[in-house]
Amino acid sequence: MNDLLEWLVHGTIPVPGGALGAREVIGNLFGLASAILGMKRLMWAWPIGLVGNVLLFTVFATGELSGHIDEPLWGQAGRQVFFAVVSVYGWWRWSQVRKAGGASDGGAIAPRWATNAERLQLVVLGVVGYAAAYVVLTQVLGSWGPTTEAWILAGSMLATYGMARGWVEFWLVWILVDVVGVTTLVQAHYYPTAGMYLFYAVFVVIGFVVWLRDARTVVDATETKEVVAA
């Protein structure tokens, strides 16, 4: 067990032309598993994601692990903290919805488009979140590439919150986060995570199509029960 922990903390995975940090690779694999489970609307998406959040936080909070930059990527690290917080909320909310009946197809939650009021809420949260993240990253913490890092942090907040609420739009927000994230991570030489972002981009499109389809066919079993009871 000690050897396994030692490898996880300090180990590397050989690849052509060099080696990749074990934590970065494994953390991203947990993130990928969480995304796949989220597409299927299974509650395991949240605890699996939490493990990845912890691993990736330790990677980005110590910028020297990339071997190419001296400053931490606090936007990337900070969003892992937010993911953890929202994951607890999402886990709780999906659990409550599931206990009340869940979705008609057996999923934890029925996907739906956000209302106009909820979309306005997302826009306001996005603008405020970006401004706040930029100020914190430039004036308080310091970060490599704060302009893009601020959007990665704010956009990730919006997407994770949207997933917790069951809004189809959260996939579209993820696409915008991935577009910026890939460029930033390549420039910072975080190649495993950049590669994972590219894969996420393909997966996010698939996830969007799946949730779009399910939003048309899957209903909230809780509402169905209430109608039957009435």
Image (tube, rainbow, N blue to C red):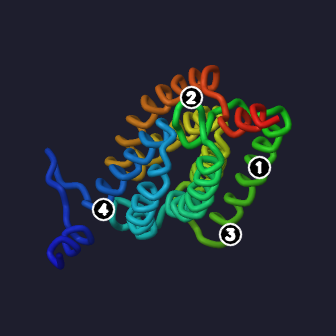
Name the residue type under label 2: Trp
For the residues labelled 4 and 3, say whether their Cβ atoms are less than 8 Å apart. Answer: no
Name the residue beneath numbered marker 1: 125
Crowding at label 4, few (<14), some or many (≥20) Cα neighbours within 10 Å? Answer: many
Q: Classify the position of the N terminus by image quarter.
A: bottom left
**Along the line of sight, the residue nearer the viewer: 140 or 58:** 58
Task: Estimate the x, y position of residue 128 in percent, counting from the top left.
Answer: 78, 53
- Note whether 46 is above or below 203 in the view shown: below
Whichever of callouts 1 and 3 sits on the residue coming sooner in the sequence is 1
Look at the image and tell me whether residue 150 can be seen: no
Label 1: state its secondary structure. Answer: helix
The amino acid sitting under disc 4 is Arg
| Precedes in sequence: disc 4 or disc 2 | 4
Q: Position of residue 169 (x, y in %)?
A: 66, 33
Indicate which disc residue 23 carries. Answer: 4
At 71% from the left and 63% from the top, the residue drawn is 135
Residue 139: image tag: 3
Q: Amino acid at mark 3?
A: Gln
Q: Earlier in the sequence, mark 4 or mark 3?
A: 4
Instruction: Tell me the residue that label 2 is attached to.
Output: 211
Q: CA distance from mark 1 to mark 3?
A: 21 Å
Marked residue nearer the N-terminal end (2 or 1): 1
At label 1, the amino acid type is Leu
N-terminal label among 3 and 2: 3
Check contact, mark 3 vs mark 2: CB within 8 A. Answer: no
User: Which callout, 4 or 2, points to the residue nearer the camera?
Assistant: 2
Going by the image, does 110 lie left or right of 144?
right
Q: Is residue 23 visible?
A: yes
